[in-house]
Amino acid sequence: MAIPLRQLIPLQQARLRRIEIGRYFKLDSGSGYIAVAILCALMGLALITQTVRVAQVGEEITALHKQRTALVREQKNLKLRVAQAQSIPYILDYVNKSGMVPANQVDVEYVVLEPSESTLPVDNLPLAGEQRP
Amino acid sequence: MSRSTPPSTPRGVRSTPAVSASAPRTLVAQPWRFAVVLVLTVLVMARIVVQLVDIQLLDRQAYAQKAEQEIFFRKEIPAPRGVIRNRFGSALALDVERESLYVNPKEIPAEDAVWISQYLEEVLNIPAEEILAKIIDTKRDWVPIARWLDPEVAAKIRNIQKKVPELKLEYETKRFYPQGDFAAHVVGTVNTMGGISGIESSMNDVLMGASGVITAEITGKGGPIWTQPYERIEPVSGGDVELTIDPFIQYVAERELRKAVTQHTASGGSIIVMDIQTGAIRAMASAPSFDPNTYYDYKPEVYYNNPAVNAQYEPGSTFKILTVAAGLQANAFTEETTVVDEGVVRRYDYNIKNFDARGNGVITPGKVLYYSSNVGAILFGEMMGESIFYKAIESFGFGSFTGVELPAETAGTVKWPGTEGYTPVDFNTNTFGQGISVTPLQVVRMAATVANDGVMMRPYIVQRVCDTAGACTSTEPREQGRPISPEVARSVRQMLMASANHYVNAVQPDTLWLVPGFQVGAKTGTSSIPDLVNGGYEDRTIGSVVGMAPIEAPRYAVLVKIDRPSDDIWGVRTALPVYRAVVAELMRYDRIAPNNDWVGSGQRSGVVNDG
């Protein structure tokens, strides 16, 4: 009857088992997995950072748009006030409150000058937004 | 120990009857049950497939759109409407954003409604009952309480919003007319669809611009998703329109017109001031006027119409200017040609009289204007003949549009010889301005043509148009013809000056001046108003004056028209004082020095109120 060799050489077996256990502690291809995991984590971090940044910028853009809208509204209101202040009734009211009186034709003495660049007729005066020649 | 078991029966095979009562019962698979389950399964599967086909293929577009609507928020950004300005750049119409107060009545707690309405009454100056009725109307979801609030009022509302968050403030664009009813008929007004009258209507395409749009992904609660940048297509603002209207001249015209309409209890009137060299309209005032900010408070005919360009009337004696000018131009008669005015003349079974039925004796064409002789106009008209007269009417632009950039302009009504309804007596009555309909703008253009040495310029009111980028296109003055020569024009102007001064001289010789210190031309007219309901003519009249100043180097043509004055039917007493006041202001405004040789006894240079 044959006797299994394993039972005969326990020391050999023990040595072999020790070698086997050691292999579990070796990195071998496991290092690759860890590297990939770290890379993934870094990429995830970058993605999150980017997402946060995009959100921040989006919020800033919206805030700037709101600010711009508010400024445009303010500008329009100022234009309205300017236009109201430029109306003849408003000017007359201001003039009256200031104690000024309208000049009568008889109060005015005309000095007739020869036309020159300094005495351009009203029609030749530059219009709003135009540059003087 | 083993237990004996009955022999197994394959599924679907009918088992043999039990051998004994104690034998275990065997389930028998019925084939019809199997078939039913199978059919039901197939039906369910088929339904699912049909539904899938429906969703994925047939209604794909609709479902995709629905999903998009839930995810995407899309809002139109209205384009700011362009600004309308006067000739010096002051805004007459512009867009402004203001906050409006809205509430959702379902959100307002019933116990708070009363005090909220009382508080709002104080802030908004609207009766509390009116506000209360709105905020307890729970059938509605979104009720406007007050729109376009002043910033100060909106600030007060914002303060109370901490206590009453149900009060909602929303920005809304409103078209503002900062100078109220100033030049209202020219500027016009807008409703929610766009311009409905005046320049707002005729230049609507230029003013309105193009809307923008904002598209963004939103959360379930409607908030923004910051990581998804939104798309924004900016609106393109409308172009700006600059008018030829001079603010001071317009102001004077409106002031004097308002005074005259009140003084004479008139139904309305118009004043037009035109720059004779270019055709630019410096003032165009009409009464009754309206405030474009609240146009809906007026009758539609008030804010839709501009009587200066679309009211037809019989020009009356002002039309004698054309009769005299046309005859002189055609050499049908000269300045010295005479006719005998006996005060009445019979034509085609009609007795046609002067306004006072009195004869003026032997008169020249100049005296036809001086005395405003109807008989003289008929006799000189007959000298030139029908065809020359109507050719002159055509060449002065009557019966056709002037081409001004204002909406709903009318061409007037001329009964041309040979057309239906024309009778030979029409020629006679037309020579002194009856039986023909014109617009105020056509008449002032006629006067401007005489003032401009016979060169007829197209009337225009848009000085330039500027787009958003600042590129501007100016209107070039355009000649529309030369119906009379410079010599004839000068001759007629002298006649008109004599006619003008005659109005302020009770006794001859004329020593007083219509506008002391200046040579001014003028011709009055008193027009009958056809009664469109009962036929014939109304009891009341239209008084008008047209002329130019100064005579030697004219700058302005002016028309004044007073409709249905209740205290006096004659234009010389209703419209002429207005004309004098306007011309005196124009001379002063243009810094034209008065000449003391042209000031009569007791008159003061440039002063017409006491003259």
Image (tube, rainbow, N blue to C red):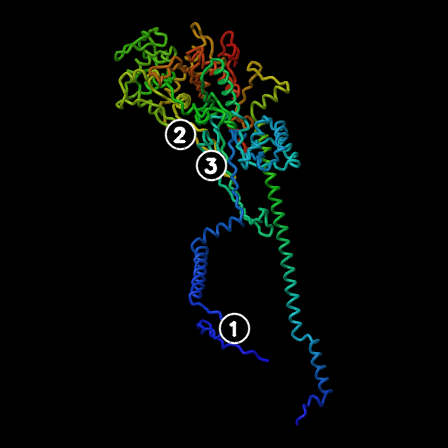
What secondary structure is found at the residue carrying circle 3?
Answer: helix
Residue B452's disc number: none
Question: Residue type at mark 3?
Answer: Val
Q: Nearer the viewer, residue B295 or B286?
A: B295
What secondary structure is found at the residue carrying circle 1?
Answer: loop
Residue B403's disc number: 2
Question: Residue type at mark 2?
Answer: Gly
Residue position marked by numbered label 3 in the rendering: B206
Location of residue B27 with respect to A82 vertically, above or below: below
Q: Earlier in the sequence, mark 2 or mark 1?
A: 1
* Occupied quadrant, residue B50: bottom left
What secondary structure is found at the residue carrying circle 2?
Answer: loop
Location of residue B522 with respect to A81 vertically, above or below: above
Which one is closest to the eye, mark 1 or mark 3? 1
Q: x, y percentage for residue B584?
A: 50, 16
Residue position marked by numbered label 1 in the rendering: B22
Lateral position of residue A49 relative to residue B404, left or right: right
Mark 3: few, some, or many residues within 10 Å (few <14, many ≥20)?
A: some
User: How far apart are the two marked residues, 3 and 2, measured between alpha carbons?
Assistant: 18 Å
Q: x, y percentage for residue B388?
A: 29, 21
Work out whether residue B324 can be spotted.
no
| Direction bottom: furthest residue | A1
Q: x, y percentage for residue B334?
A: 33, 15
